[in-house]
Amino acid sequence: MVQLRPDADDVGDEPTTFGVWSGDRRVATLVAQVNASASALEVTVADPVHATLTECGDLLHAVVTRARDIAARQVEVTTVDPLLRQAAVRAGFERTLRGPLRCRADGTTVPSPPAPDSADPPGPADAGQMAATLASLTGVGVVVVPASSWISRMARGAVAGFAGMVKCSVDPQDGGRALALTVPNRSDVILESVALTVDIALGVRRRFGSAIDHLRTVSFDHSSHGLKGGRYAGEAHANASIISLNASYVLALVLDEDRRNRPAVPGRDLAFLPPAFTGLERTAAHELWHQIEATFEARRYGASIEFRRRLGAHLGVETLEHAIRGREHDAPAPWRAAQRRLVDEVSDYGGSLPGEATAEMFEQWWCPVRQLSPVVRHFGELVDEYFPAPG
Ligand SMILES: [Zn+2]
C-alpha cells in the first residue's frame, strides 16, 4: 500500500505537496489543492514517477480517498506519466488525449487498484477494440488491416521482434494519405501513448507536407538490436519511409518491470512540474526530423547546406559540422566554444553528429518542455524560413 505524506513544511498550507511513499521508498511527488468551488481535488503529479503499476493504482486510490475525506466530489489528476495514466484508465478514470484524468469521488465506489497481474504474460490484444480506442483518442480514422493483405510482405512478428503484431491504417481525414501503424499484439499496449505518437506524426505531416510525404509507417517494434536492447529509443530508416519506435515505451508490463528493477532512492524528489510532452512524443519528433532532413538533402541539397551554414553562423563557426568537430582535442577555440553551446543549449547527443544536432533541436522546438534555448529558437526560425507553414 502507498501512503500520501505531506511534506512537513507544507502542512496546513494550500496547495499541499505530498510525498507518495511505498514503504521506505518515495515513488512520486504530487501537489494537491481544492478548486475554487471546493468541488474538486486537483492533483498535479511531478515527474519523474517511480511507482510500479500496482503502486500507481494505490496512489490513485489514496487520492480519491483523500478527496472523499474532504468532501470533494471530483478528482482531477494532471500527469504525463504513461504508467500512472494507464492505471487510471484501468481504475475507471475518464481521459482525453493530453488532458487531465477525471473521476467522481462522491459515488459509491472508489476506484480500486488494479490487481497485480504482472506475473501473467500478456494475452493478445483485441485488435478491433484497439483501433476503436485509438480512433476515439486521436479523432481520426483508425481501422485494423487484416493480416492476409500484408503478411506476405512481412513475416509478421519475426521482423518486428514480437510473436504477433497488429497493423492499423490511420486515415488522417484531412485529405492526406493513410499512415500505417504497427504495434505488438499484446493486451498491455498503452494505447494512449500510441495515440500521442500518431498525433505527433500527423501534426508534423500537416505542417511539413511534401517534405515528409514519403512517411508511410510508424512502427512500435524491436526490429533492431539497438531497439531490443533499449539502447535506442527510435530509428528513422533512411529513405525507407518508416520510423520505428522502441516498443518497450508502450508496453505497460515492460515499464512496470523496469520500475520494479530500478527502485527509487528514498528521500525527497525534485518536484518538477509535469512536462507538456512525454519522452515518447519527443522521440517521435526526433525521428520525424531525420525523415524531413533526408528528403531536404536529397531534393534541395544546396538549401540544406545553407541551412547548416546559417545554424553554424549562429554558433560563431562556418557551418554546423565545425561545432560538432569542436569535440576533437586539437579543434580551434571557436569550434570548441560552438561545441560547448550545442551541449549546453541542446544536449550531449546533439553535440555528437550534425544530423543528431538538428534532430535534437527539432525535438525541443516541436515538443518544448522548457523555454527554448537561443540556438533552438534560431533553428525554429530557420525551419519556418526553409519550410514555410502551409496556408
Ligand atoms: Zn537521431
Image (cartoon, rainbow, N blue to C red):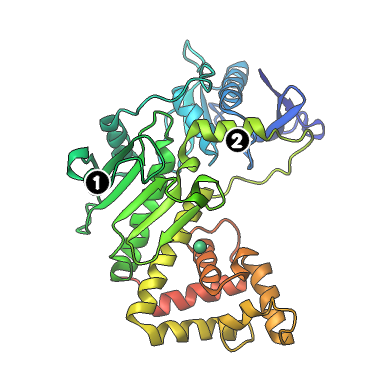
Q: How many marks?
A: 2
For label 2, the crowd category at 10 Å Cα-Cα, with few meaning under 14, some 14 to 19 and many 20 or more, is: some
The yes-or-no answer for disc 1 within 8 Å of ligand 1 is: no
Quadrant for the N terminus, please.
top right
User: Which secondary structure lies at badge 1?
Assistant: strand
Q: Quadrant of residue 237?
A: bottom left
Q: Position of residue 54 (x, y in %)?
A: 58, 23
In the rendered image, which quarter contains the C terminus?
bottom left
Task: Tell me where residue 143 appears, x and y as whole percent.
Answer: 22, 40
Q: Earlier in the sequence, mark 1 or mark 2?
A: 1
Q: Give me the disc on residue 258.
A: 2
- Tell me the number on the disc at residue 169: 1
Q: How far across and how far down the image is residue 184, in percent?
A: 38, 38
In the rendered structure, the answer to whether residue 150 lies left or right of residue 358 reads left
Crowding at label 1, few (<14), some or many (≥20) Cα neighbours within 10 Å? some
The reply to whether dot 1 and dot 2 touch (C-beta < 8 Å) is: no
Between 371 and 54, the one nearer to me in the picture? 54
Amino acid type of the residue that numbered disc 2 sits on in the rendered structure:
Asp
Image quarter for residue 192? Answer: top left
Q: Residue at x 30, y 38 (%)?
A: 136
The residues tagged by marks 1 and 2 sit, at their Cα atoms, a distance apart of: 31 Å
Residue at 59 percent across and 89 percent down: it is: 318
Instruction: Tell me which residue sits at (74%, 33%) in the image.
Output: 13
Residue 47 circle label: none
**Residue 293 in the figure: left or right of residue 248:** left
